[in-house]
Image (spheres, rainbow, N blue to C red):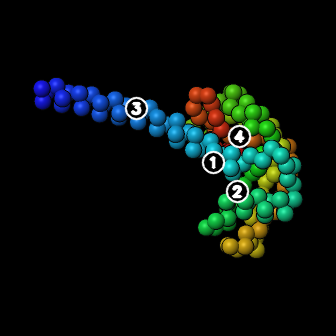
Amino acid sequence: MALQRTRSLLLLLLLTLLGLGLVQPSYGQDRMYHRFLRQHVDPEETGGNDTYCNLMMQRRKMTMRQCKRFNTFVHEDIWNIRSICSTTNIQCKNGKMNCHEGVVRVTDCRETGSSRFPNCRYRASASTRHVVIACEGDPQLPVHFDR
């Protein structure tokens, strides 16, 4: 009786651990995808000026503990951005082969030389250009803005 109960508990433990192992990567991917959305996606705006960068960097929480030096906002629908993940894999800056390239409308926000935390200030530059994003998962989702 005790042996059978021990086996049942071990089996339950094993199934629980397997379940956690299977769930963990998708949770991490989901977290990285939502971080990507928060830091880089703004489909409603065209951006392009310093006021936009100053406001968005603060709203998107990239000036909380220090001034983030550089960030790019993509002005495309999320489905257009996700479609980049279906293009040919290319090498990322970190050497991994999970990056993809596409052309999108962006605003690059670069910290000014006189900017000091907590008064972070940015210079904007709007353009349509090639970008490289890292994608992960099934389905493939953008999780990192590479360049």
Instruction: Please state the horizontal and vertical placement of residue 118, each as a whole percent of the image.
Output: 68, 73
The Cα atoms of the two marked residues, 4 and 2, are separated by: 21 Å
Look at mark 1 in the image and give the residue it sits on. 35
- Is mark 1 in CB contact (under 8 Å) with mark 2? no
Look at mark 4 in the image and give the residue it sits on. 132
Closer to the eye: label 3 or 1? 3
Q: Please, is residue 66 above or below residue 31 in the view?
A: below
Closer to the eye: label 4 or 2? 2
The residue under label 2 is which amino acid type?
Arg
The residue under label 4 is which amino acid type?
Val
Going 76% across and 58% down the picture, which residue do you hit? 56
Look at mark 2 in the image and give the residue it sits on. 60
Look at mark 3 in the image and give the residue it sits on. 19
Q: Please, is residue 56 above or below residue 121 in the view?
A: above
The Cα atoms of the two marked residues, 1 and 4, are separated by: 16 Å
Secondary element at image label 4? strand
The Cα atoms of the two marked residues, 3 and 2, are separated by: 33 Å
Instruction: Please state the horizontal and vertical placement of residue 75, each as a whole percent of the image.
Output: 81, 44
Going 75% across and 41% down the picture, which residue do you hit? 131
Question: Taking the image as drawn, is residue 94 in sight?
Answer: no
Taking depth in this image into account, of 89 and 121 the one nearest to the observer is 121
The Cα atoms of the two marked residues, 3 and 1, are separated by: 25 Å
Categorize mark 1 by other alpha carbons within 10 Å: few (<14), some (14-19), many (20+). Answer: some
The residue under label 3 is which amino acid type?
Gly
